[in-house]
Amino acid sequence: MGCECSKLTKCCWSSDYTGSVPEDRNEANEENSELDDLPAFREYNIETLRMATAGFSAENIVSEHGEKALNVVYKGTLENQRRIAVKRFNKSAWPDARQFLEEARAVGQLRNHRLANLLGCCGEGDERLLVAEFMPNDTLAKHLFHFIIPIIGNVCLFVGVVDYGGNAESFWETQPMKWAMRLRVALHLAQALEYCTSKGRTLYHDLNAYRIVFDDEGNPRLSCFGLMKNSRDGKGYSTNLAFTPPEYLRTGRVTPESVIYSFGTLLVDLLSGKHIPPSHALDLIRDRNIQMLTDSCLEGQFTNDDGTELVQLASQCLQYEPRDRSNPKSLVAALIPLQKDTEIPSRELMGILDGAAALPLSPLGEACLRMDLTAIHEILEKLGYKDDESAANEAWTSQMKETLNSKDKGDNAFRHKDFRDATEFYSQFIDVGTMVSPTIHARRSLSYLMTDLPQEALNDALQAQAISPIWHIASYLQAVALFTLGRENEAKEALKEGSTLENQKNTNA
């Protein structure tokens, strides 16, 4: 599926540009600080990742095709509360464990704020898993192609390779991506490729709109997963792209210039807001039919000169002959002067609302946001064990008398707000270990909060979630504990997750 050279004049920006995007010094310091906070690449054991994903629960799958995906991706949370994305390869992938570990270690040495960085891997037995930073605000494909579809809850990010959980319904799901944000995406992607090239990683597997993910602040990042070599032989790179670089059809090899070709198709995506075959895009460019190429939703957001410059850059990247294409360094140089509204944060441009404002909260959600423990207690007391599947199980009546007495005494103390006794009796019930109850962990979690033990409260809320991954109350209690511990950003994410799960439950009721 090749295409001819465009007759447009090639872009003339200098390729020896060494500058970078002008950034506020404080912003640059914050980005460096974030990188400093990232742990060194490490190998995880399978049990750690199993616990982080609640036993690789189907409820934690964020791959587009769910369990049917060739390689399934899960969201998860480590014991230290770091949120992660875990890609689990199918059993036939990467037969050589040594090659897998070596390749993962190499990619794991990269650290850049334009990447969704690789944190670790697992090659235990026949398991092959990658662990990456979790990006909560979806993919470029979601924002660019599906903005008219309202979505509630977590959605996929990888198409079989790069997936992360997403936010609940917000402004960007009903509005097209702004021109300034599209330019920022192009620049951040070019900077990511420039960084990887400077570190000797010039190749990328299937560069497309699903590989660009958005972090907590709405900044676009390039997924690190595509930097891994072919899983079948651990030696080269293949492609499953719909619009394959012409030279790949001839040689079956992906080259650095092939990556630039794919970057060109992404520029066309950003311009048009839809998938357009490169050959058709170049026909429109040759005919100077730029209006047909650009997204009608962008009317009035840019001048003809602005559009023409990006079209020319796309044309240069899509040249039939690899040697005629641009390179990452010159792409960065070309895109810097095109940037608009650089003073506006990405979160604002994307319409991603901050914190709890992103979702309408239920009375329980509002109580958690206010950290109103008394109101939370009243709601949990009224709820009782209605959400606890174990409560309806006959096993409750078949347990030893002492265990049931501990639960009853705990419930009585909880009802009368004697939280120290409630903690003690619930602990007795839990320690017996003959059965599990998310509700009892939730009640003990609130009891810990009432007695100024937020870390213990957080541990119980996480345990409740491990038992029942889609239970909204577990996420809400995590939020309260995290707020108490001063971990505000994590608390907001937990609060949003709780609201999303509650909305899903009410929708399905």
Image (tube, helix red, strand yellow):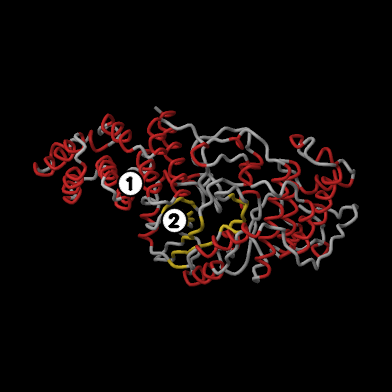
- Relative to 237, say whether 302 is above or below: above
Tell which of 51 and 474 is nearer to you: 474
Q: Secondary structure at mark 1?
A: helix
Which amino acid lies under the numbered mark 1 shown in the image of this protein?
Answer: Ala
Measured from the top left, where is residue 460 in percent x and y? 30, 48
Query: In the picture provided, is 404 more to the left or to the right than 207?
Result: left
Is 459 left or right of 69, judged from the image as shown? left
What residue type is disc 2 on?
Arg
**Residue in the image at 57% along x and 65% along y:** 111
Q: Which residue is mark 1?
A: 461
Disc number for residue 82: 2
Q: Nearer the viewer, residue 101 or 83?
A: 83
- Name of the residue lying farthest toward the left: 401
Quarter of the image with the C terminus in it: top left
Seen at 65% across and 57% down, the residue is 239
SS assignment at label 2: loop
